[in-house]
């Protein structure tokens, strides 16, 4: 990955920041985006102190124009784009019968349409350089999670898009990776949207029992180097995907009971 130019959306915290670090420490030149300027600037400063070549750009992936600006900035600063990591994402927690549909739309705009905008903008450069498009999906893209209507729907849509892109890019030698972490320590649950769009505030799960963002990023880095197509992380995640394929009705009950254990779960 030395001297490869890597764009990471949502790179100011969590998995995105960890990805910027692992790629940067291996010699890549990084551009990260984020909506919050203070978080973005802090992340850039911290990573530069580690000797990483990095640029931060305040941008909202759900805005098509912001993605065009992101692409233009990467080319202006570094002269090329080799890898796009579609990492930016949000989640929500509410029953479908109670959630305001605008909340679901906001999740889809960031998690799905944000990937389309970023990929569409960067793809000509990536095709030229036979690079990589990486989507940070989720086990929730294989098994719907109750109380996560928008999140699960966005990840199912993302998995479908990446599968299409991977197939279309076969003859062009572009690497497309669908990366599916299980539950991973990050800020995503703390910033989760509730039924009316307000922030949840606290994570409903024990973050100490999860895979760290650094470990998740390290696995994605290795999968990128080896040009793997799909990675499903954590034993729990792999088991969930396997059982859901063969025993979907059984998994309805298992998943319901697991998600009902969460603090303040909307499931009765």
Image (spheres, grey):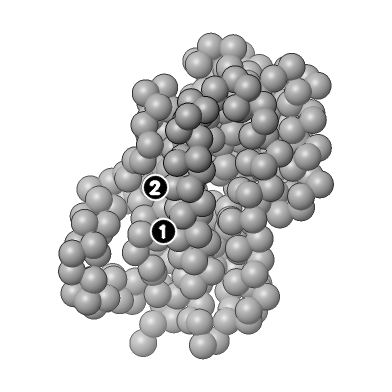
Residue 256 occupies quadrant: bottom left
- At x 48%, y 26%, the residue is 173
- At x 71%, y 39%, the residue is 121
Q: Position of residue 73 (x, y in %)?
A: 79, 28
The image shows residue 268, relative to residue 117, as above or below, that is below
Mark 1 or mark 2: which comes first in sequence? 1
Secondary structure, mark 1, is helix
Name the side, left or right, on which 183 lies relative to 203. left
Asked if disc 1 and disc 2 are in contact, CB closer than 8 Å, the reply is yes
Q: Nearer the viewer, residue 182 or 84?
A: 84
Crowding at dot 1, Cα within 10 Å, few <14 / some 14-19 / many 20+, comes out as many
- At x 21%, y 56%, the residue is 242
Please, which residue is most extreme toward the front here?
171
Residue 70 occupies quadrant: top right
- At x 69%, y 20%, the residue is 80
Q: Nearer the viewer, residue 212 or 62?
A: 62
Q: Nearer the viewer, residue 83 or 164?
A: 164
Q: Position of residue 71 (x, y in %)?
A: 74, 33
Q: Position of residue 140 (x, y in %)?
A: 40, 60
The image shows residue 76, relative to residue 88, as above or below, that is above
The image shows residue 267, relative to residue 35, as above or below, that is below
| Residue indicated by mark 1 | 141
Q: Is residue 189 visible?
A: no
| Residue indicated by mark 2 | 180
The C terminus lies in which quarter of the figure? bottom left
């Amino acid at each position: 990955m030395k001297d490869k130019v890597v764009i990471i959306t949502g790179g100011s915290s969590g998995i995105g920041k960890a990805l910027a670090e692992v790629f940067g420490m291996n010699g890549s030149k990084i551009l990260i985006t984020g909506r919050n300027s203070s978080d973005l600037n802090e992340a850039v400063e911290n990573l530069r102190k580690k000797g990483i070549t990095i640029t931060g750009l305040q941008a909202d992936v759900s805005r098509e124009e912001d993605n065009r600006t992101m692409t233009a900035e990467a080319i202006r600063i570094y002269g090329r784009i080799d890898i796009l990591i579609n990492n930016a994402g949000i989640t929500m927690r509410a029953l479908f019968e109670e959630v305001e549909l605008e909340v679901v739309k906001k999740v889809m705009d960031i998690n799905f349409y944000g990937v389309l905008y970023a990929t569409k903008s960067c793809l000509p450069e990536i095709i030229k350089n036979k690079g990589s498009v990486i989507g940070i999906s989720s086990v929730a893209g294989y098994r719907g999670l109750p109380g996560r209507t928008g999140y699960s729907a966005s990840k199912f849509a993302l998995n479908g898009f990446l599968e299409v892109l991977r197939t279309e890019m076969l003859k062009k030698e572009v690497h497309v990776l669908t990366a599916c972490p299980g539950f991973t320590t990050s800020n995503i649950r703390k910033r989760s949207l509730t039924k009316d769009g307000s922030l949840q505030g606290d994570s409903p799960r024990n973050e100490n029992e999860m895979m760290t963002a650094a470990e998740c990023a390290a696995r994605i880095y290795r999968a990128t180097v080896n040009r793997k197509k799909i990675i499903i992380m954590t034993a729990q995640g792999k088991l969930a995907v396997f059982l859901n394929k063969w025993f979907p009705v059984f998994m309805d009950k298992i998943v319901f009971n697991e998600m009902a254990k969460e603090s303040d779960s909307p499931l009765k």
